[in-house]
């Protein structure tokens, strides 16, 4: 059994200074404040974004569906500064939040975790299994969120939300509340999406919302009208949410979520790879196909209490079950030999959150628990030999993983100017894997068991300052710790790596993170802006390495990620406004030259660091809101600071990913009270470009049309 681990002593790092107050314009009575959205994701209960000492964004239904018009939920996060959308393939978007993705970020769906212990290092495609039409609102918390959302919320936490349900009128039986149908068409994606949903209520007790989605994507056309063979796929979703009101302040929320994705091909590792500035000459395998199918289902129920008049103001008690199945089929270069992998993860979990007001501030506290059950296997089918079956699949078979957390947070306002948020979390992880390949290659049949358990106590502190005594101008500083225990993928993954096979590794320690952060938010009648700087100190990051050519894993010693995010809106007059964002990021760690332990240690860039990235645009939106339009430019600098792993990966052009500037138009027209039309012309110049780390280029000149009809 692996030893219990606790956080090592952190090196002393100077905290970031509070950023200067660049604007001090007074707000007159009746003037509009722009930043008035409310968030829950940052502190666990409702709080205005402008007074939240975190970097938070809220994307509502209209912004996602009629302004951004993304093909998937993950793609909607392109609107958030500091997020990089890496795309291994068409239909495989993996958002990077502050330099990390997948197992170091947390995605929730209506408040319940999608993450499980199967999520691997690097870009994953599982955020694409959330229906962007049904879960059409998003709360995005950038930076450490481990206090409330668990050990793996290092880069941030995202909550995908369905539309809130309406309480009907008493004594009036079944009542129709609202519904809509939506059609989305894209020329470069050669895609067509259909969604319909509706809501009914029964008296003032029960509300139900049902949604259905189908999306069909053809072969992608990238810049210069370049064809991308075998990038077509399809997906569909079916969703139900409901609320039963016990009384005005007590209710039971429940739902079912099902999403299925078929025939997503990872073409950059196949003969269908399309060269981008020399990528075809690096790391190609010549496989005929690498196809993924995903099936995710979840059912949940949560009791919610609000507006309590005693020691308990709010209470949430929820239970959920999630089933995730991944089928991965690899057709080798001879066109006859197949490797077929299947992984099934069942997760049961619960979470409890309570909010208690007191003379010493508001106390938020609770506990959460989840248990993953994993089954995995691998079949090799060669025409010249009988099919061989292996209990070891992509991860070990017959596995269980428990994750338990207990947390406490206090929000204390000293006066109208100063407020502090302090909290701590205890995390315990326990792992049992029954069948693991322990040999020196994937097929020698040597198997064994791996067990381990880890725990840690982490904390967070935030200080908020309101110079004017209101939320028109706020500054904050904070320091937060994060802890991530090795998961099933870290310990037992058996997959390709470094020209060979990545073998299970039992002797891994947890990862530790400490993030220092400072920010300023300003909202006036003329617009709004916010600026955040951060520094994340990394200890013992788990990395894939080689030892004399043999694949292994090891904890690295030191590393860091630092960056700055800026978001700005400026109103020119009643009809026109300017908007823009800018993000800079850098990360380095102490690793080994060419990832080979025998070469000795060296300081190396961290993989997939976002280059300098920005957006600038002008928006025309008359006050009557019948129509609107935007012209905007997406820009990114070149990224030539490559990690050693990126120099032998054919997703990265030799010398790095080049810079780009893409020009875009979008607008909308409210045809009637029930009908809205949105149109985008993306990549007007048909530029051939790629987001850093992606295995496929961005769409070429792309006309996207969305029609939404309410009823």
Image (cartoon, rainbow, N blue to C red):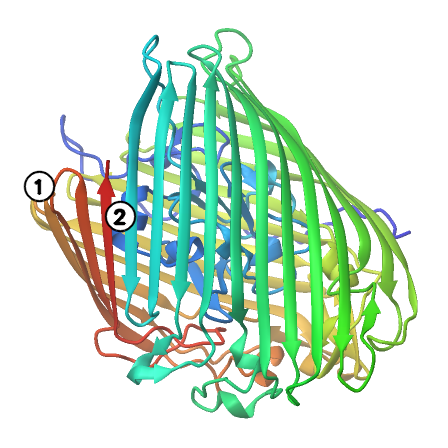
Question: Image point 40% across, 66% down: which residue?
Answer: 217
Nearer to me, 174 or 621: 174
x and y percentages locating residue 536 in the rendered image: 56, 55
The answer, for residue 620, to whether it is visible in the render is no
Question: Image point 92% across, 70% down: which residue?
Answer: 446
Q: Residues within 10 Å of mark 2 (few under 14, many from 20)?
A: few
Question: Which of marks 2 and 1 precedes in the sequence?
Answer: 2
Q: Secondary structure at mark 2?
A: loop
x and y percentages locating residue 565 in the rendered image: 38, 56
The label shown at residue 22 is 2
| Quadrant holding the C terminus | top left
x and y percentages locating residue 669 in the rendered image: 13, 50
From this view, report whether residue 471 is shown above or below residue 380.
above
Question: Image point 73% across, 60% down: which residue?
Answer: 490
Residue at label 1?
623
Nearer to me, 523 or 689: 689
Q: Residues within 10 Å of mark 1 (few under 14, many from 20)?
A: few
């Amino acid at each position: 059994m692996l030893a219990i681990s606790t956080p090592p002593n952190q090196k002393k790092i100077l905290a970031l200074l509070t950023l200067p107050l660049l604007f001090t314009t007074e707000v007159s009575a009746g003037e509009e404040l722009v930043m008035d959205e409310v968030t829950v994701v940052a502190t666990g209960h409702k709080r205005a974004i402008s007074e939240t000492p975190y970097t938070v964004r809220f994307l509502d239904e209209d912004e996602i569906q009629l302004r951004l018009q993304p093909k998937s939920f993950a793609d909607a996060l392109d609107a958030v500064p500091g997020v990089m959308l890496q795309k291994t393939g068409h239909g495989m978007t993996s958002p990077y939040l502050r330099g990390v993705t997948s197992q170091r970020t947390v995605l929730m769906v209506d408040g319940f975790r999608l993450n499980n212990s199967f999520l691997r290092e690097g870009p994953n495609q599982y955020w694409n299994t959330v229906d962007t039409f049904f879960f059409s609102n998003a709360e995005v918390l950038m930076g450490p969120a481990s206090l409330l959302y668990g050990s793996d919320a290092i880069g941030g936490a995202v909550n995908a939300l369905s539309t809130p349900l309406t309480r009907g009128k008493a004594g009036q039986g079944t009542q129709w509340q609202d519904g809509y149908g939506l059609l989305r068409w894209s020329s470069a994606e050669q895609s067509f999406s259909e969604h319909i949903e509706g809501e009914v209520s029964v008296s003032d007790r029960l509300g139900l919302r049902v949604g259905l989605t189908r999306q069909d994507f053809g072969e992608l056309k990238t810049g210069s009208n370049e064809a991308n063979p075998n990038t077509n796929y399809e997906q569909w979703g079916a969703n139900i949410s409901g609320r039963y009101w016990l009384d005005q302040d007590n209710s039971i929320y429940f739902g079912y979520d099902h999403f299925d994705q078929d025939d997503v091909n990872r073409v950059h590792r196949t003969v269908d790879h399309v060269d981008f500035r020399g990528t075809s000459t690096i790391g190609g395998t010549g496989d005929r196909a690498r196809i993924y199918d995903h099936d995710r289902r979840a059912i949940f129920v949560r009791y919610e209490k609000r507006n309590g008049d005693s020691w308990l103001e709010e209470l949430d008690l929820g239970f959920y079950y999630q089933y995730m199945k991944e089928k991965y089929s690899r057709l080798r270069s001879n066109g006859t030999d197949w490797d077929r992998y299947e992984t099934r993860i069942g997760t049961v979990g619960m979470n409890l959150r309570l909010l208690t007001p007191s003379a010493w501030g508001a106390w938020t506290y609770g506990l959460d628990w989840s248990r993953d059950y994993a089954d995995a296997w691998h079949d090799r089918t060669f025409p010249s030999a009988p099919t061989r079956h292996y209990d070891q699949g992509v991860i070990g078979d017959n596995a269980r993983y428990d994750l338990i957390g207990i947390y406490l947070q206090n929000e204390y306002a000293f006066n109208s100017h100063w407020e502090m948020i302090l909290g701590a979390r205890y995390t315990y992880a326990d792992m049992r894997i029954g069948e693991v390949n322990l040999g020196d290659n994937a097929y020698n049949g040597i198997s064994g068991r791996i067990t381990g358990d880890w725990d840690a106590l982490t904390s967070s502190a935030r200080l908020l300052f309101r110079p004017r005594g209101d939320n028109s101008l706020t500054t904050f500083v904070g320091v937060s710790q994060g802890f991530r225990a090795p998961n099933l993928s870290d310990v037992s993954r058996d997959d390709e790596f470094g020209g060979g096979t990545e073998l299970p590794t039992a002797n891994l320690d947890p990862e530790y993170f400490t993030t220092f952060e400072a920010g300023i938010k300003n909202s006036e009648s003329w617009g709004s802006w916010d600026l955040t700087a951060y520094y994340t100190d990394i200890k013992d990051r788990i990395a894939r390495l080689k030892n004399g050519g043999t694949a292994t894993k090891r904890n690295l010693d030191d590393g860091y990620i630092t960056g700055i995010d800026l978001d700005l809106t400026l109103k020119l007059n009643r009809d026109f406004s300017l908007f823009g964002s800018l993000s800079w990021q850098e990360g380095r760690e102490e690793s080994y030259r060419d990832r080979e332990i025998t070469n000795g240690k060296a300081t190396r860039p961290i993989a997939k660091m976002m280059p300098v990235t920005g957006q600038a645009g002008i928006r025309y939106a008359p006050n009557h809101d019948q129509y609107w339009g935007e012209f905007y430019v997406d820009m990114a600098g070149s990224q030539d600071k490559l990690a050693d792993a990126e120099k032998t990966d054919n997703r990265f052009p030799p010398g790095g990913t080049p810079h780009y500037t893409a020009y875009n138009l979008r607008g909308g027209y409210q045809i009637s009270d029930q009908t809205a039309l949105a149109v985008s012309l993306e990549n007007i110049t048909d530029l051939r470009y790629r987001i850093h780390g992606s295995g496929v280029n961005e769409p070429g000149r792309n006309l996207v049309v969305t029609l939404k009809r309410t009823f």
